[in-house]
Amino acid sequence: MTGTYQGSCLCRTVRFEIKSDPKALTHCHCSQCRKAHGAAFASYGSVPRADLHFIQGAELMTAYRSSESVIRQFCSRCGSSLFWSKSRGEYADWISIALGTLDTSITSDKQRHIEVASKASWYEIQDQWPQAQ
């Protein structure tokens, strides 16, 4: 992977690009990610915050502080969950992008499941990616 990646929300009002390869591709099974995405888990990739650029719709972004140090951002028009980031501490200069919002294909041999101790009881992980509690 190398290059620029394009992404957008469901209604395509918010459009963005990232200028670096997403790192730390994770499938998070924590209850907050499950609720934010309405799914068994949420898939994210992280980039330095400086590598995220809005093409349009930045003014339509809304934020929700889901915990003391985590901010989740979404489109105020269609509700698409787009990003999460730490507001302070280690990695505060990185942002995690919901991989399902990317319009550009992405592949990675390095992925992992995290927060599997709180995964949905009705979902069984059946892929080859490592799992972290």
Image: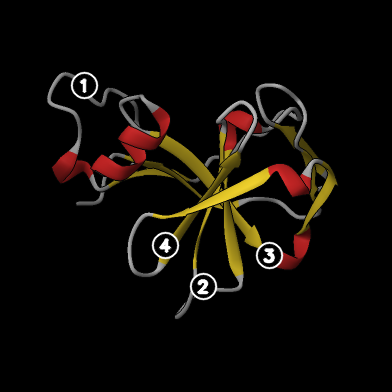
Residue that badge 1 annotates: 123
Give how far across and how far down residue 11 sits, in percent.
Answer: 71, 22
Vertical relation: 67 (above or below) 87: above
Q: What is the CA distance from the residue labelled 1 to the residue labelled 3?
A: 32 Å
Q: What is the CA distance from the residue labelled 4 to the residue labelled 3?
A: 14 Å
- Under tag 2, what secondary structure? loop
Q: What is the CA distance from the residue labelled 3 to the residue labelled 2?
A: 10 Å
Residue that badge 2 annotates: 91
Q: Neighbour class for label 3 at 10 Å: few (<14), some, many (≥20)?
A: some
Sequence-wise, the earlier of marks 1 and 3 is 3
Looking at this view, is 31 or 21 the one in front?
Answer: 31
Sequence-wise, the earlier of marks 2 and 1 is 2
- The amino acid type, in three-letter code, at marker 3 is Arg
Q: Quadrant of the N terminus?
A: top right
Q: What is the CA distance from the residue labelled 4 to the residue labelled 2?
A: 11 Å
Give how far across and how far down residue 35 sits, in percent.
Answer: 32, 34
Looking at this view, is 69 or 22 the one in front?
Answer: 69
**Tag of residue 49:** 3
Q: What is the CA distance from the residue labelled 2 to the residue labelled 1?
A: 30 Å
Q: What is the CA distance from the residue labelled 4 to the residue labelled 1?
A: 25 Å
Residue 129 in view here:
no
Residue that badge 4 annotates: 70
